[in-house]
Image: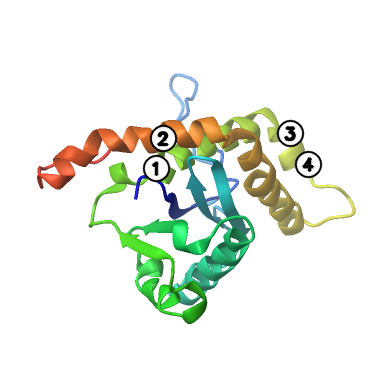
Amino acid sequence: MADKKIVYLDETNFNLWISRSQGWSVQGTRAVDLNTYSKGSNIHVIACISRDGIEFSEGRFRSSKWEAANDFIRRMLSCLAGREALDNVVVMVDNAPCHSRAEEVFDEEEFASVECLRLGPYSPMLNGVEDVFSVFKAAVKRYMAANRRNILEVPESSTIAAHRLTVLLHAANTISREVVTSELCRKCIYHTFEFLADAILLKDMAVGN
C-alpha cells in the first residue's frame, strides 16, 4: 500500500452568495435585511487528489447523483490510466449518498485492477481532500470579496445568470489550480495520518479537530 498511488475523492459546492449575515443600523432605527432569499445556483466541484496534487477535477451545475458520481470516477480513472498503471491505484471514497454505488465502477473489467477503499461514517479527518476543500473555498471567498464590484456588474452582452455561471466556473477551474498545489495536498494528506492510530483502535474522535 505504501508504494501505491492513493487518490482521495470527494466533492463540495458553493455559490456567489457573499452578503453579510449581520449588519447595523443607526441608533433608534430598526435594522432591515434587504438581502434576497435566493442564493442562486450552486456549482458542484468533485475532485481527486494525491500526494502529487490534483489528479482530476470537474465543476458542474447539476446536483450529484450516484450515476453522475460513477461517471466521474470512470473519467478520472481513464485519465489516470494515461500516466499510471491502474493496478497501482487506490481510490478512497467516503459515505456520501452519491458515492453509495461507487464499487460498481471497480467491478467493471476495465477498472477491476483498481482498489477501492471506503471510509467509515463521520470520518472526514481521514480524507485528505476535506482540508484541501477548506483552503480552496477560503480562497474563493477572498476572490469574491476582492472582485465584488466586477461580480455584481453584469456586462451588457450577458445576462445575470450567464455572468454568475462564468464567475463560478472561473472559481472552480482556475482558482482551484492556483491554490491547490502538490505541497498543499501532501500537507493535508499527511495531517490525516495523525488520526490513523486512533481509527485502528476504534477510539472516538471529534469531527473537525
Name which residue type carries label 4: Glu
Q: Is residue 64 above or below residue 15?
A: below
Mark closest to the chain's N terminus, 4 or 2: 4
Disc 2, SS: helix
Do labels 4 and 3 touch, CB within 8 Å? yes
Disc 3, SS: helix
Q: Nearer the viewer, mark 3 or mark 1?
A: 1
Disc 4, SS: loop
Task: Categorize mark 1 by other alpha carbons within 10 Å: few (<14), some (14-19), many (20+).
Answer: many
| Distance from the alpha carbon under mark 3 to that under mark 1 | 34 Å
- Residue wearing tag 1: 128
Tell which of 29 and 38 is nearer to you. Answer: 38
Do labels 2 and 1 touch, CB within 8 Å? yes
Tell which of 195 and 95 is nearer to you. Answer: 195
| Distance from the alpha carbon under mark 2 to that under mark 3 | 33 Å
Task: Categorize mark 4 by other alpha carbons within 10 Å: few (<14), some (14-19), many (20+).
Answer: few
Name which residue type carries label 1: Gly
Q: Is residue 37 above or below residue 131?
A: below
Do labels 1 and 4 touch, CB within 8 Å? no
- Residue wearing tag 3: 149
Q: Nearer the viewer, mark 2 or mark 3?
A: 2
Q: Is residue 177 visible?
A: yes
Q: Position of residue 49 (x, y in %)?
A: 50, 47
Q: Which mark is residue 153?
A: 4
Q: Is residue 79 above or below residue 123?
A: below
Q: Position of residue 142 (x, y in %)?
A: 59, 30
| Distance from the alpha carbon under mark 1 to that under mark 4 | 37 Å
| Distance from the alpha carbon under mark 2 to that under mark 1 | 5 Å
